[in-house]
Amino acid sequence: MTGGRRQRVGWLGGFTLGVGLALCAPAWAAVPPEPSSLARCEESFDAHPEGSDAAMCFFRNAQGLPGRDEARRRLQGLIARHPDRPWLTLVLGHMELLSEPALAEASYLRAALAFREQGDAEGEVLAGINLRSVLGMRGRTEEAHQWVLRVGEVARASGDPKLEVRALILEAAELSDLGQDLGRAYRLLKRAEALTFPDGTDGMKKQLLSPLATVSVNLGRFDEARDIFARLAELAERTKDAGTEARVRFALANLAWRRQEERPEPGGRLELLRLAREALASAERAGSKAFEAMSLRLVAELLGDGPEERNEAEDALGRCIDIARETGLPERRISCLWTRAERRSAVDAAAAWRDVDETLALAAEHDNPLYLASAWRARSMVAFRTSPLPEALGEAERALAAVEVLRQWQRDATSQAELFSSWASDYHRLAGRTLEAGEASAVPPREALERAFAVSERLRARTLFEALVASRALPTQEEPPEQRKARDGVLRGLSATQRRLLDPALSASERTRLLGELQELERRERELRPATQRAELSFASLSATEQRLGEEEALLVFLAGTDHDLQGERAGGAWVLAVTREGTRAYRIPERARLRPMVALLSGLIERRDGSEAAAAAALYAQLLAPALRELPPKVSRLLLVPDGPLHDLPFAALREHADAPPLMTRYELARVPSASLLHHWREQPARPPEGEALVLADPDRGGTLQGTAVASARGGMFLETASLGALPEARREGRTVSEALEDTAVKPRLLMGTEASEQALKASHWDAVRILHVAAHAVVDVESPERSALVLAPGAAGEDGLLQPREIAELRLRDALVVLSSCRGASGAQLAGEGVLSLARAFFESGARAVVASLWPMRDAEAAELLERYYRHLAAGQGAASALREAQREAWEDGEPAAMWAGLGVMGDAALVPVRPAAGGMGRSVLLGLSAGAGLLALGLWGLGMRRARRKRGSGQA
């Protein structure tokens, strides 16, 4: 139940109301007004009847329930005496909205039409915004859309920037209300934010911040949403705005729910219930019926299953449904009905199904993909509680089909991935419950494996898969010349702004200004990109995957779900599927909340470089791999790992059977793959001959653009500290070593170092010939803004900034090349549930790479050079991408090097890729040199064996 409830709290937490009141002035509010206060409002109006401020006086003095009726009575009297003053009617609508939306609709419509007749653009825009909000709340989407168009038309014709900002916010509200293109909604709101702060009115700021926070929640940007709600709370307190305070309290309770699900803490449900009750009390004080309904539902969801709590929940949901029906709020009614259906399913199945049927009927009536997806999910949750498990699984599969429809409404890949991440728990639940059904023979075991595997494939790296399939299957999309020209101009602006941000002498105020400018340029660039191409996807089936794997390969598919939700309902658990040519088996593993600290502990111990990680590595091996590996066919020597959740950060190479055992990479070649479908996609392409060019960039020299002159010990750095990154002299040695290793192969090196290792040179390369791209340079990883992550190169041209970022990487058009990122954290970055890690490595896959070698953590300069030297020696001998890395890592381990040196580097993509063929006649130079020197060094080698063993003992923490 956890995923269903969590998603619905987020989605239907209230974007329709998220726009808030479009006020013409700051909403100064107070406790119940004194009659004299309202009398002064009347006096003020009599003195200045033509403006908005006198009318707003009534709203400012009637925020709480006690004085609202008196304020409305006086307003209605003034309207009767002054029918030509629509500001009075607009403010009357504000007061009616909280408790009687139907009356507010009529008032807003009268005000809008009167303003139009008087030619008052500001008045019509404000009335139109509020009217659209009420119409959306009441499910009348087509009428609401007509007012979006009208407000935009009036705002543009007025030439008033403030009205145009309000129109932007309204456009974003409609997109989000209907579940359409949340990415565009977010970008519109960020554009409006830049125009509203710091000089906009308090009313404009509230109108902006509320939907911006809600869209951020719906895209999974919880930290950003929390910060925005904090700004909104400060505004509400300063202006004593009870309605906004109610909105914020509900939103914060909603966010806390999300946090608890991601990182469960003891006693979390009770704390959430406390927050929900506070939100309900705040809504009741403000007289906000919409937020009262939403808070009642949240309280009901969090109550337990004891008799008293069950009765309280039933009462709360009955009140919620009554409020929604009386005020004409179908969205609230739908959400309260499905919540009641879920709760009733434990005690009254017939009543639960009646609620579900009513929920689906209402959702279908409004034809909103958000409503429909959530309603179908509620149906599946009731089915899990009341129906035989096979039937419940069928209902859950139909619910995911509704989620897929919602996903297709998103225009760009980023918003698709962000939205999809919020529904990932539904896929985990269905896959896990299907495997449980197979265990219990409620579904034939083989059928359960096939269906669970299919669900997993629909979850994994979807936007990457779609992009690669489209790039192969569809013709290149031609940009209109004007759009291309506009985008080129924005890209030049981005480069120029980032060059200025690299200046460490910038003042704080100037840096803040430039960051705002950068954000706006990034938004415009996203808007100008060609629309995402959609190709029909064919996901890999379990049978096809088994048939296509080599007999030496096993695919380990991890599903890091949760065992139970906040209410104690079964949520599918966590699993690993071991797929080989001989068949597939499923094994339980610890749930996600247990895995996260275990992975973090191992990484922290490895960082100590003293061998103390051995026990932690053995513990993770026992819980993740031991049962599956014990039953693998004896010929398996390569593990293809499909990680999930915290396992994306796990250095699998360092795991071991027991504390004194050799690490996993001594037994198996290892590679990570985003999904079986992507693995098939790569392997279905015609193999390119292992010949061509290796483009090697090493230790880029940015000249005067970098201020730091110190030699760096690690290949890392923060984005805004790029200017202080030092030189990497070992990277130059690495570049030369790579070139020497490849000289006598069919892949000829082109080495660029210093100022030649530039962004301009890389972009100008002839990618059809490139089989290997090797970059030994700093990288910066921005987890908050993944598209600002970059490889730090020399600029090479006046129009470049030397920061090779994901949007630029994706346009390189590599053709099944091997990319080696000898840099900091090329394999790590922000994570999206289901989609995976938004890393630099991923960007190279988008550009057409077939395999990427990259690190999970910062690498010491000298150690990176040494490990990659070993890697290319084996690669030049004709070994595959994963086989060569296994040998390099094994050698480093045998030489006593700590796991921090070798365990973070990994192969992603097609492990079997062989990018290099030794030159005709035999072996490469590095191999020949090794053989010629071998005989003379035999005695030294025997001595060195003993030394390596001694160093290995020290590296393992042994005496």
Image (cartoon, grey):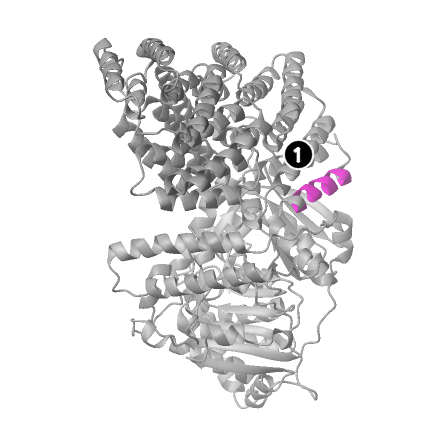
Q: Decide whether the magenta segment is chiefly helix, strand or loop.
A: helix
Report the front residue among 806 and 112: 112
Residue 556 seen in the figure: yes
Q: Is residue 456 depicted above or below 550 in this figure? A: above
User: Residue 107, percent across and down?
Assistant: 45, 18
Residue 217 seen in the figure: no
User: Residue 287, percent across and down?
Assistant: 38, 15
Residue 190 lies in the magenta stretch: no
Report the front residue among 293 and 517: 517
Q: Is residue 261 depicted above or below 385 in this figure? A: below
Residue 432: which quarter of the image? Answer: top right
Quadrant showing the C terminus: bottom left
Label 1 sits on a secondary structure element that is helix
- Residue drawn at x 53%, y 32% is 177
Residue 956: which quarter of the image? Answer: bottom left
Q: Amino acid at mark 1?
A: Ala
Report the front residue among 5 and 500: 500
User: Residue 673, percent across and down?
Assistant: 62, 56
Q: Does residue 387 appear left or right of residue 294 in this picture?
A: right
Quadrant showing the N terminus: top right
Q: Does residue 834 appear left or right of residue 99 in this picture?
A: right
User: Residue 339, percent across and down?
Assistant: 56, 20
Q: Does residue 572 appear left or right of residue 9 in this picture?
A: right
Give the magenta range.
446-457
Q: Is residue 526 depicted above or below 63 in this figure? A: below
Label 1, residues with CA under 10 Å away: few <14, some 14-19, many ≥20: some
Residue 453 lies in the magenta stretch: yes
Q: Which residue is mark 1?
A: 402
- Residue drawn at x 64%, y 61% is 478
